[in-house]
Image (cartoon, coloured by chain):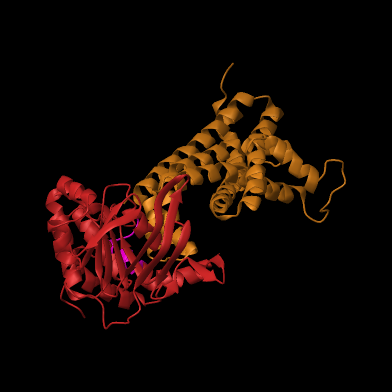
Amino acid sequence: MSTDTTSPGGSTGDQPRIVMEDVSKKFGKNTVLDGLNFTVARGERVTLIGPSGSGKTTILRLLMTLEDLTGGYIYIDGDPLTYAKRGNRRVKLPNKEVTQIRKRIGMVFQQFNLFPNMTVCENIIEAPVHVLGQSKDEARAKAADLLDQVGLRDKIDAHPTSLSGGQQQRVAIARALAMEPEILLLDEVTSALDPELVGDVLEVLREVARKTDITMLLVTHEMQFAQDVSHRVLMFDEGRVIEEAKPEVMFNNPTHERTKQFLQAVL
Amino acid sequence: MEFDLEFALETVGPLLMAFLQVTLVVTVAGSVVAALLGLIWAVCQRELPTPVRLPLSWVLDVIRMTPLPLQLLFAVAIFISFDGYRKFPDTDVETIGMILGVAVFAIHYSTYMAESYRAGIDSIRQGQWEAATALSLPRSRVWRAVIIPQALRATLPSLGNWAIAMFKDTPFLLVILVPEMVAKAKQLGGASYQYTEVFTVAGLIFLAASYPTAVLMRKLEKKLVY
């Protein structure tokens, strides 16, 4: 378990957790990502920053297989996620294989996306029971533990609609963690929240970062939070990484002119 | 013209009998089957590949856009035939008529219900599908546990309306000689030339049945609210 925030990953020579190879994504004629390459080590927490439309959310969505890759490959622990190389050909993998890899990845959305027809507990145990094959009792016990971690034990049988946005988002975090993912994708998880509810959610995520070695990719506008939890920050512009650095360097001493402009505008 | 109350009361019994034995049976069985079929059509239209989905949509459109009485006659022409020659000589005509009635009503209204379901399914936010994908839920489970329960909530009021519409269409069964209530009323009226009385009673029975159904639907809707 790595608890320090400086050296992610295990020993050298470890397989990277995520490899993005020559990834491109077009929506119609609009190129969002263009030949993107980067790797994320095991246990590493990486924040993606950049102006809106720069492609950072698209990266999370590609990793979660919510969007189809236009070109390139994504590898999770060395396994191809959606497309594989077969000789010279680029082959789309069948759903069954994709699901096997995707199970290692969890995501928390800007809009929470809890299932309103289920209770908090049902939301959390749905996938552990029906995807991982846990028994209901086992899954419920784990859900209770997770709700303890996010400070919502007493809401276990509540309906999501009766919760505040911040509470819903904490349930959504618990729901993602219930699948015991190796990778957690956080897509602007506080952007839809009232300002006074942001703190609780970020505190929960800081705790997750402290106590686990889950690899995290975050898109956030909370720069202080990004600086506190991430090992590395990538600055995006027009579908490319234009600067990457440790957070203290990126936020205090950026080199790229575009990064300076962007940070000045948001900080 | 006088309203013969005594005669009207006398007809309540036989009309109610016809109502319970035919009208209600066709409506209840028809709505249940239509609701199931409609859901199947709506899911198929989302899940099937285009080469299969398009022909299905055309067929459903054709059924939805042709009159119910014509479809009843068509079904009779195929399965019973009018010219004295019966294709199922061992089964009595009324039973076949009932079965055909339920089938035609169910299929006809399933095409309308499918549209209601589709609207309900379309109203579910994309985020629900995405959350289900992010949890790797199997497709069948996504439908059963996430999409259908939520869609149903939006769809139920209009399903109820279709069921009531179907109920009010049951007199069309008289074109295929199924002895439902209005046919019975016509027969009773014809025997005494007191049509006003029998049709009034028949109308009141319809009303007495529709109203509680509407109330029941509303209660059910409230139950589904979360």
Establish if B99 lies above or below B9: below
In the current view of this chain or complex, which residue is farthest to the top? B1
Q: Is residue B156 visible?
A: no
Residue at x 60% of width, y 54% of height: B49
Q: Which chain wears red? A: A
Quarter of the rendering containing residue B71: top right
Lateral position of residue A13 relative to residue A75, left or right: left
Along the line of sight, which residue is nearer the eye, A170 or A186?
A186
Question: Overall secondary structure of the magenta stretch?
Answer: helix
Residue B168 position within the rendered picture, expressed as x and y whole percent measured from the top left: 57, 36
The tint of chain B in the picture is orange
Residue at x 26% of width, y 76% of height: A141
Lateral position of residue A80 relative to residue A166, left or right: right
Lateral position of residue B113 relative to residue A20, left or right: right
| Magenta-drawn stretch contains B32 | no
Q: What is the magenta range?
A: A117-126
Lateral position of residue B210 relative to residue A158, left or right: right
Residue B161 position within the rendered picture, expressed as x and y whole percent measured from the top left: 49, 39
